[in-house]
Amino acid sequence: MNRIKAFGAFWYDFVIGDDWQVAALVVAGLALTAILAHAAHVNAWWLLPLFGFAALAWSLHRATSHK
Amino acid sequence: MNALPLILTVFVACAVEAIEALTIVMAAGITREWRSTFQGMAVALVVLAAVTAAVGPAINYLPLTALRLVVGALLLIFGLQWLRKAVLRATGYKALHDEASAYLREVTAAETAARESRRGVRDWYAFTLAFKGVLLEGLEVVFIVITFGDNQKNIGAAVIGAAAAIIVIAVAGIAVRAPLTKVPENWMKFAVGIMLTSFGTFWGAEGAGVAWPGNDAALLVLVPVVAIVSAACILWLRSRKSAAVPALEKEAVGS
């Protein structure tokens, strides 16, 4: 059981890293881009960079707001 | 795309991983013993070769759009995490990753661990330390080479970048016989974070179904924009920190 936990923890740390909200915002940005591109036929190339920058700023804000 | 940016990106990214692996190997070899350390390294390299042989060809069977979506998402997450750490370190919110102190930590742990021989290995601790270090950092190198190489349809260039990085770091490590402490690791990580974020954004958005204005040339705009935003984050946190210090002093005087 401990080995399975350690295996899971390794992959969580490898893929998600220190702040899961960054990963969540990236996935949300990609999903929204795909919806706009396929359902609304909007070439929203600008959306993912905005989500990326917002994720970085939000994560930095949270990491430093109590220090 | 020209192969040079690809080679340079992979080179810097893999150099950072190689420096971290070197620190662990040096700690195991110098403090414990070299034979078991080399055995650990060798077994890790065999596992890495097996993983590469299994994953590499399998990736070619995936549709390019799905591959770009998944790889883009992963690279963007990795890149933003690297940038986050580099910005926090550059602004003093997080301690700088110091190879000298990382080395000392490993050395202290290695010196206190009991010597035990197991499965034909004289020093099991040195073996597992070297095995884990090389395997974990090596997995990241394999991931970088496969994803960058496959997406740009130039695995050869990615392999050249990675091999050059590993050779340069290994030769430097052998020459100084110590962890590489003079390397500006945080700024290298900052640069790698910018490249991973830019390529991740580019491929991720393509995989999600959009077409970039100017196709591959969009990267020439995306990379500087990511760099400017990241630099702006450093300035923002620095001003925030300097604003917080007088406020704290004022609070202390008031109380």
Image (tube, rainbow, N blue to C red):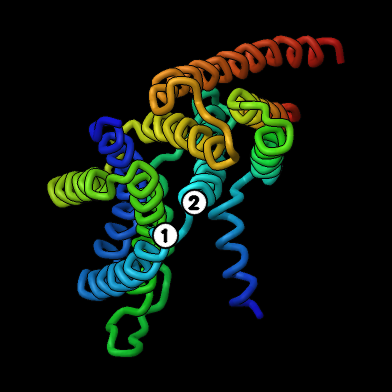
Residue B206 position, x and y percent, is: 52, 37
Residue neighbourhood size for the residue with mark 2, other residues' Cα within 10 Å, grouped as few (<14), some (14–19), many (≥20): many
Q: Amino acid at mark 1?
A: Ile
The chain holding disc 2 is B
Q: Residue furthest bottom?
A: B119
**In the visual, does A59 lie left or right of B155?**
right
Q: Measure the alpha-carbon separation of dots 1 and 2.
A: 8 Å
Q: Quadrant of the C terminus of chain A?
A: top right
Toward the right, the furthest residue is B255
Q: Are marks 1 and 2 in contact (CB under 8 Å)?
A: yes
Quadrant where the N terminus of chain A is found in the figure: bottom right
Q: Secondary structure at mark 2?
A: helix
Give residue B114's position: percent from left, percent from top. Answer: 40, 77
Could you tell me which residue is drawn at 61 percent across and 15 percent down?
A: B236
The correct choice, above or below, for B63 with respect to B97 in the image is below
Asked where in the image residue A23 lies, by quadrant, the reply is top right
Query: Would you identify the image quadrant in which residue B237 lies?
Result: top right
- Depth check: give the residue in front, B14 or B158: B158
- Which mark identifies residue B59? 1
Q: Which residue is mark 2?
A: B67
Count of numbered circles in the view: 2
Q: Callout 1: residue from which chain?
A: B
Residue drawn at 56 percent across, 14 percent down: B235
Q: Nearer the viewer, residue B216 or B249?
A: B216
